[in-house]
Image: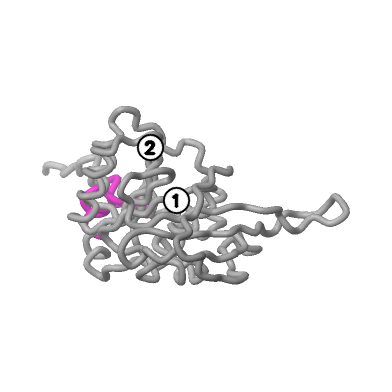
Amino acid sequence: MTAVVEPPVARLAALPGVSTASRVAAQAERARAAGRVLPVVPALAGLLPSAGLRRGSTVAVHGGTSLLLALLAEATAAGSWAAVVGMPSLGLAAAAECGVDLARVALVPRPGVELPAVVAALLDGVDVVAVHADPVQAAVARRLSARARHRGAVLLAFGAWPGADVELSCRFSAWTGLSDGYGHLTARQAQVRVHGRGAAARPLSATLQLPGPAGAPLPLHSEAAPTGGVPPREATA
């Protein structure tokens, strides 16, 4: 009697928590078909023109990574797949505390000169692709934004991105939680401003706790920015 030996890939795929590339792509395709807008935390929903991350759009984030992680949190928690490209110093513990489901996040920390090709490939099978490219050539930015639009993915740029549909910037103030020189940092106040094209042409701003005491951002108050005002591109850590 001849013994049947399973291929190594089949044995690995049978292990709990292990997914093959084809399985991930199929799950992402089903999630993509489920809706045209990916959810975001309530504190940010009122700032975005579709109350979430509209598939096919390019969103540029300026400021600390807390805002980027806040945008990824609700989408991954709801079952969407995400990838982060070109951010080797991203804190995974901080991402988890912000509510990001790390089991649904792929990391490509140092893509080097292959960054455009890597991002293009990920946009074909992942719901949200966050990328840090500083600087990015305008022609490359247009090509990748067009691919996101065609594939129904969200391109989430950390930093300047020519032709972005929506731009979010944040300015941080002091942390809270310390008293008389001791204690634990619990929350940080930030002013988040949004502007863009089309439905996002009217600038909006909100003062949030980012992160809040439980990790997710919490609203303090919001307002429309002055007519004609353009949010500054903050570059605070």
Point out residue 235 in the picture as x, y percentages from the top left corner: 54, 43
Point out residue 60 in the picture as x, y percentages from the top left corner: 40, 51
Mark 1 residue element: strand
Could one spot residue 188 in this view of the protein? Answer: yes
Q: What residue is shown at x 34% (from left), y 36% (from top)?
A: 136
Quarter where residue 237 is shown: top right
Point out residue 108 in the picture as x, y percentages from the top left corner: 37, 38
Q: Is residue 114 magenta?
A: no
Q: Which of the image's four quarters has the N terminus? A: top left
Point out residue 116 in the picture as x, y percentages from the top left corner: 27, 37
Label 2 environment density (alpha carbons within 10 Å; few <14, some 14–19, many ≥20): some
Q: Residue furthest front?
A: 228
Q: Nearer the viewer, residue 52 or 228?
A: 228
Q: Which mark, by number, is residue 114?
A: none
Q: Nearer the viewer, residue 128 or 139?
A: 139
Q: For the magenta stretch, what is the residue range?
A: 11-27
Task: Read off the residue under disc 2.
Answer: 133
Instruction: Please count the marks in the image.
Output: 2
Could one spot residue 121 in this view of the protein? Answer: no
Q: What residue is shown at x 41% (from left), y 36% (from top)?
A: 109
Amino acid type of the residue tagged 1 in the rendering: Val
Label 1 environment density (alpha carbons within 10 Å; few <14, some 14–19, many ≥20): many
Query: In the displayed structure, would residue 85 be above or below residue 35?
Result: above
